[in-house]
Image (cartoon, rainbow, N blue to C red):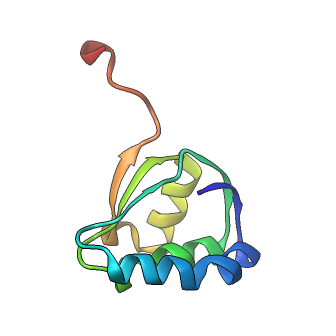
Amino acid sequence: MRGEIDAAVQARREDELLRLAQSADGRIHIDLGAVTFMDSGGLRLLYHAATAGSGAPVLERVPRRVRDLLELSGVAELFELTDDAGPAEDEA
């Protein structure tokens, strides 16, 4: 995903994402590193991905503002979240 993820994007992409989540052999991975904005439409899109597939989706490179939205909405536990930052300094 990239750019602004809002109700308009949710309306256009929800069916496709649900099909992918339902047909996946394992957990799906969604890269959010290029997301600049997300509203309740984007949150709904992610929620449906979490409830349609098998296992918690992995949200990769989650920007702080999206992580905050997930946590404030009480749905963060439906996902495995990875940071938007690179490796820690001692790992580099």
**Placement of 43 over or under 82, stated as above or below:** below
Is residue 60 among the parts visible in the rendering? Answer: yes
Residue depicted at x 34% and y 81%: 23
Q: In this orientation, which residue lies closer to the viewer: 35 or 19? A: 19
Residue depicted at x 49% and y 73%: 46
Is 23 displayed left or right of 17 in the figure?
left
Residue depicted at x 47% and y 83%: 18
- Image location (x, y in percent) of residue 22: 35, 83
Residue depicted at x 48% and y 65%: 70
**Placement of 7 over or under 61, stated as above or below:** below
**Placement of 58 over or under 91, stated as above or below:** below
Is 41 displayed left or right of 21 in the figure?
right
- Image location (x, y in percent) of residue 11: 69, 83
**Placement of 31 over or under 72, stated as above or below:** above
- Image location (x, y in percent) of residue 77: 31, 68
Picture quarter containing residue 21? Answer: bottom left
Q: For the N terminus, which image quadrant?
A: bottom right
